[in-house]
Amino acid sequence: MTSPLRRTAVLCALLTTVGLIPAAPARAATPTPLLRFGACPASLPQPPAPEHLACGRLRVPLDRDHPRGPHIEVAVSRIRASGSPGERRGILLVNPGGPGGSGLAYAVTKRAKLPRSVQRAYDVIGFDPRGVGRSAPVNCGRMGGLFTSPGTDPVPVGGPAERNYLASLREMAGDCATGAGAALPHLSTEQTVRDMDAIRAALGERRTSFLGVSYGSYLGAAYAARFPHRVGRMVLDSVVGPWDWYDFDVIQSRALLRQRDTFFTWTAAHADHFRLGGSATAVRRAYLRVRNGLTRHPVDGFGPAEFDRAVYRALGRTERWTGLAEGLRHHLDTGRPDGLRPATPSDGPDARNYEAANRVVKCADSPAPTPRRILADIHRVRRLDPQPVLTGMEASTCAYWRHEPARRTPLGSPDAPPVLLVASAHDPVTPIEGARRLRRLLPGSRLITLGDDYTHGVFASRGNACVDDTAAAYLVNGTTPEADVNCHGPGLPDVP
């Protein structure tokens, strides 16, 4: 027998069909954001087949927890796969690092270095993360005098210098709060990974494969934490470990001391060429003569802050060591810092955006240090070496930030597929311990180590066949190594 409830339901359905009872409105499906491609900015490099390159903009909520609020646009670039449809494996989203690195042009430059099989298999997708480049770029203005030339000594010694140092951090945080305004708490890694997934959806792909270098590895691990079932194949190169950003900066500052000692020993081994001394101790003395001289008498806006910035940049890439050593010798001979200056302005619009985005993202991602801890850590590193390089301590600014992140950014997931981690054995920018720790959060993943190597950035960068072939087989064929892979590296550079 049909129940009264069933008879009522049937009657209502019939009346609705003939129009006597209005039908309930259908729930509108959430539309997939549109991403239309067209011409790219003229500033982007051109690939060998320019017709394969296109750019677009994707509109996304500034605060993804409030999608009806203000929106921003994320700039995206795409280079189509060069192989046949049968060879295609989907999209490969790429990120160059930072935080603050622009990925729009990076898609072109990095793709040109990828193994040919990867170029044939993937549409390479670049994007400027929110707050960066052409994606609602953040501007922190003066940033506490960071762009004043010459800058104040970044290694404070004594009470007055330390108080001035903390005051500059407070001013920097205030500049960013003013410059970013309401966007400040929303320029985070967690918000960016949701933009990444919106790019995937807008391109009609079920999964995202990803290649991230340096901060890009942190971004990839955060994507795997939030969207583990949408991860295709993921290569994380020069890995940022799963530490709070300030803790990472402290670890990096110590690794830079080890790398600088290696640089002093290497320079001494080529004493006939560089003429800075025949021992590491002698080269160190020459180094300090240059820095101390620039501290007392900056030259053309080049003082201790600019010097440390140049050293920081050079220590991370061994191909820059010759230039650093020759720059030191040139300054001792002529009193000029020309050989130490970066090739591109360190205070231009791109540099200002990079430095601003770097701090805004770091301070949005993890808890802040206290001013007391910052000074204590400077004391500790100065006990290791009285003249450290503290240029990479960007997260110190977070001590005076206007908001606290709700939580530490989650990284990795046991539900994600196996990931390939790549590291240089002696990289001072992202020490290898970070890769080992992150691997624990990504079960089944493998680590490729380039031994006897001292440079930041490995896959499709160092020209090492062992690394590149292993990563290409993983990306194209899904071949995960049975165990970790150790590749033989190039050692210290030769002198031209």
Image (cartoon, grey):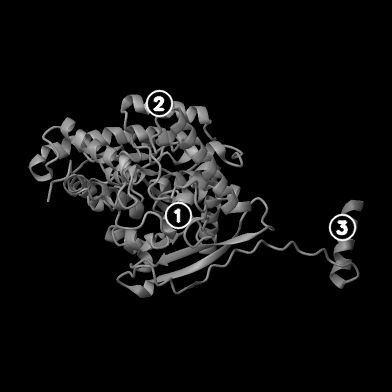
State the image coordinates of residue 395 (x, y, percent, origin top left).
Answer: 47, 39
Res 62 quadrant in image: bottom right
Distance between the alpha carbons at the discs numbered 1 and 2? 29 Å
Distance between the alpha carbons at the discs numbered 2 and 3? 77 Å
Q: Earlier in the sequence, mark 1 or mark 3?
A: 3
Label annotation for residue 352: 1
Instruction: Give the number of the mark in front: 2 or 3.
Output: 2
Q: Amino acid at mark 3?
A: Ala
Instruction: Give the number of the mark in front: 1 or 3.
Output: 1
Q: Secondary structure at mark 2?
A: helix
Horizontal side of 37 relative to 96 (left or right) equals right
Q: Secondary structure at mark 1?
A: helix
Q: Secondary structure at mark 3?
A: helix
Please report the residue visible at 59 percent of the width from the left and 48 percent of the height from the top: 177
State the image coordinates of residue 155 (x, y, percent, origin top left).
Answer: 38, 35
Q: Amino acid at mark 1?
A: Arg
For the residue pair 114 and 310, the one nearer the viewer reads as 310
Q: Residue furthest left?
A: 272
Q: Which residue is mark 2?
A: 379
Please report the residue visible at 52 percent of the width from the left and 50 percent of the height from the top: 193
Label annotation for residue 180: none
State the image coordinates of residue 293 (x, y, percent, origin top left).
Answer: 27, 40
Q: Are the residues tagged 1 and 2 within 8 Å (C-beta)?
A: no
Distance between the alpha carbons at the discs numbered 1 and 3? 65 Å
Regarding residue 329, the answer to whether it shows in the image is yes
Q: Which residue is mark 3?
A: 9
Q: Amino acid at mark 2?
A: His
Q: Earlier in the sequence, mark 1 or mark 2?
A: 1
Q: Earlier in the sequence, mark 2 or mark 3?
A: 3
For the residue pair 38 and 144, the one nearer the viewer reads as 144
